[in-house]
């Protein structure tokens, strides 16, 4: 039986509180055939939104790209990067100020073989392919683009209600996580006023976390 979805109330809190609450929870991706693919959240980043966080897509207000961030809490905000990978975020707070939590890394729980097949389909020959083929499952979803590749998440899932256990993608209750390690967020414009904010939370010592895995 698939795990039960998280309640919307979990997402209707301060965005950094939501980020911490998501560590240890599960992402469930229903498949067209067979059981769902499931990963445990081990790394997240909080984004503060309108007029607060210059690194957030929502800083200057709603746009067609980021309008989901301004809607109810607990919905998927999926965007494509310049490299054409996608990133999965969860709308938070629900105060119409565009706050969200980016899911940066998962630890595979179920469906690892399917995740591996999806990753390998996008890889040429090289050391990463060799490691994944050899069973380095902790590297499958260790980064936001890799996470979306593993779970076949693209822009078609933008706006999906992540509290709906009957939907194609939802968040479910996992297990308690140890106190998080807070670090600066990754890959932001160093000229941004919010560059260096310690708004990235990760499970200490988890191999599935993306680099850097310690304070910089």
Image (spheres, helix red, strand yellow):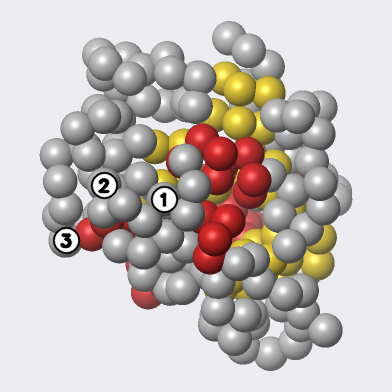
Count of number-bearing discs: 3
Residue 58 at what x, y percent from top left? 24, 44
Distance from disc 3 to disc 1, alpha carbons, whole Å, reads: 20 Å
Q: Answer with the quarter of the image where residue 172 lies.
A: bottom right
Q: Quadrant of residue 52?
A: top left
Instruction: Look at mark 1 in the image and give the residue it sits on.
Output: 93
Mark 3, residues whose alpha carbon is within 10 Å: few (<14), some, or many (≥20)? Answer: few
User: Of helix, strand and loop, which one carries label 2?
Assistant: loop
CA–CA distance in space, label 1 to label 2: 8 Å
The residue positioned 23% from the left and 59% from the top of the image is 67
Instruction: Count neighbours of disc 2 (C-alpha within 10 A) and say few if under 14, some if 14 to 19, many if 20 or more.
Output: many
Picture disc at residue 97: 2
Q: Horizontal and vertical percent for residue 143?
A: 58, 41
Residue 45 position in % (x across, y down) = 50, 36
- The reply to whether callout 1 and callout 2 are in contact (CB within 8 Å) is yes
Placement of the N terminus among the 4 image quadrants: bottom right
Q: Which residue is mark 3?
A: 64
């Amino acid at each position: 039986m698939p795990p039960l979805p998280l309640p919307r109330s979990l997402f209707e809190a301060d965005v950094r509180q939501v980020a911490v609450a998501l560590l240890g929870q599960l992402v469930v991706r229903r498949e067209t055939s067979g059981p769902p693919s499931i990963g445990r959240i081990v790394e997240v980043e909080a984004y503060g939104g309108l007029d607060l966080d210059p690194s957030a897509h929502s800083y200057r207000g709603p746009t067609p790209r980021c309008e989901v961030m301004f809607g109810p809490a607990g919905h998927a905000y999926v965007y494509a990067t310049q490299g054409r990978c996608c990133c999965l975020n969860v709308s938070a707070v629900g105060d119409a100020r565009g706050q969200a939590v980016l899911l940066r890394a998962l630890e595979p729980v179920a469906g690892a073989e399917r995740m591996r097949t999806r990753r390998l389909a996008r890889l040429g020959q090289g050391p990463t392919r060799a490691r994944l083929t050899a069973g380095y499952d902790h590297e499958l979803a260790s980064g936001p683009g890799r996470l979306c590749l593993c779970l076949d998440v693209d822009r078609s899932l933008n706006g999906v209600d992540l509290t709906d256990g009957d939907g194609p993608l939802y968040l479910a209750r996992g297990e308690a996580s140890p106190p998080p390690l807070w670090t600066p967020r990754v890959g932001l414009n160093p000229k941004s006023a919010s560059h260096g904010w310690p708004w990235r939370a990760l499970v200490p010592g988890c191999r599935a976390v993306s680099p850097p895995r310690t304070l910089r």
